[in-house]
Amino acid sequence: MKGFRQLVRNMLPRWFFVQRGPLGKNVVYLSFDDGPTDGVTNALLDLLRQYEVRATFFVVANKLEDNFALGERIVNEGHLVGNHSYDHIAFGRKALPDQIWQVEAAHQVIARLGQGYRGFRSPQGYWNLKLLIWLAIKRFRAIHWNYDSLDYTIKDADKIISNFSQRPVTDGDIILFHDDSELCIQVLREMLPRWKEQGLEFGLLKDL
Ligand SMILES: [Zn+2]
């Protein structure tokens, strides 16, 4: 079933649903969900700056309200901020009006950062057709991923790093991490120099 869903998603036009970037450009797309997190996101930004890597942060808007200066730092350092709902409620258990409220309320907070990006990633990657159509009409872009680091289930940096060795990233991959714990930093401290050495470049999801 999972493979079938992935196949269907791959067939959707990119203005409607984005799951991966183009092949042949040697560019991958790092994405961080569930922040910004005091004590984590700052250290992650330090690491990204060290390797001159840009990334997209799908923030939870009520966390952004509490850490707005951190959101400004994300933007000032050349990264992109996307919408990951207002308070990360489980979308699968909510009706469309509640889902819409989450997207719009989050957008109002995020818009104060001045980037104008309208990429939305649903909590837990939950999508349905009604939500996708509403997003398209309102010119929000649904952004999923195709490479999951599984940092929220594995909870072990060495294991995640070894998974990256066994199944290397390839160009066009949209890679999912979470900046609500330091795990992503432990993993990327190891992986960023490797990826840079391979000549991979790091794009922002607004450019897809
Ligand atoms: Zn999330």
Image: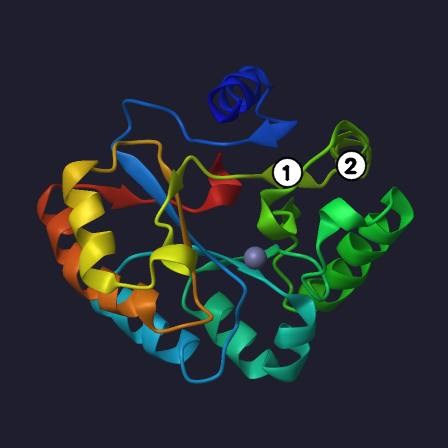
Whole-Å distance between the Cαs marked 2 and 1?
9 Å
The answer to which image quadrant residue 169 occupies is: top left
Closer to the chain start, of discs 2 and 1, is: 2
Numbered circles on residues, count: 2
Q: Is residue 24 left or right of residue 75?
A: left
Q: Which mark is residue 131?
A: 2
Residue 192 in view (yes/no): no
Please state the quadrant of the image where ligand 1 appears: bottom right
Asked if the residue under mark 1 is in contact with the one under mark 2, i.e. CB atoms within 8 Å, the reply is yes
User: Residue flagged by tag 1: what amino acid is it?
Assistant: Ala
Which one is nearer the viewer's eye here, 178 or 199?
Answer: 178
Closer to the camera: disc 2 or disc 1? 2
The answer to which image quadrant residue 17 occupies is: top right
Picture coordinates of residue 146, whole percent (x, y): 42, 35
Residue 164 in view (yes/no): yes
With respect to residue 68, does 32 lie above or below?
above
Picture coordinates of residue 129, whole percent (x, y): 76, 28
Write the residue at 39% across / 79% down.
42
Which structural element holds mark 1? strand
Q: Residue furthest right?
A: 97
With respect to residue 65, does 6 lie above or below?
above
User: Residue flagged by tag 2: what amino acid is it?
Assistant: Leu
Q: Is residue 96 left or right of residue 109?
A: right
**Mark 1 CB lies closer than 8 A to ligand 1:** no
With respect to residue 192, does 129 lie above or below?
above
With respect to residue 38, does 199 lie above or below?
above
Which one is nearer the viewer's eye here, 154 or 179?
Answer: 154
Is the residue marked by circle 1 packed among few (<14), some (14-19), or many (20+) residues within 10 Å? many
Write the residue at 50% across / 24% down.
6
Q: Which mark is residue 142?
A: 1
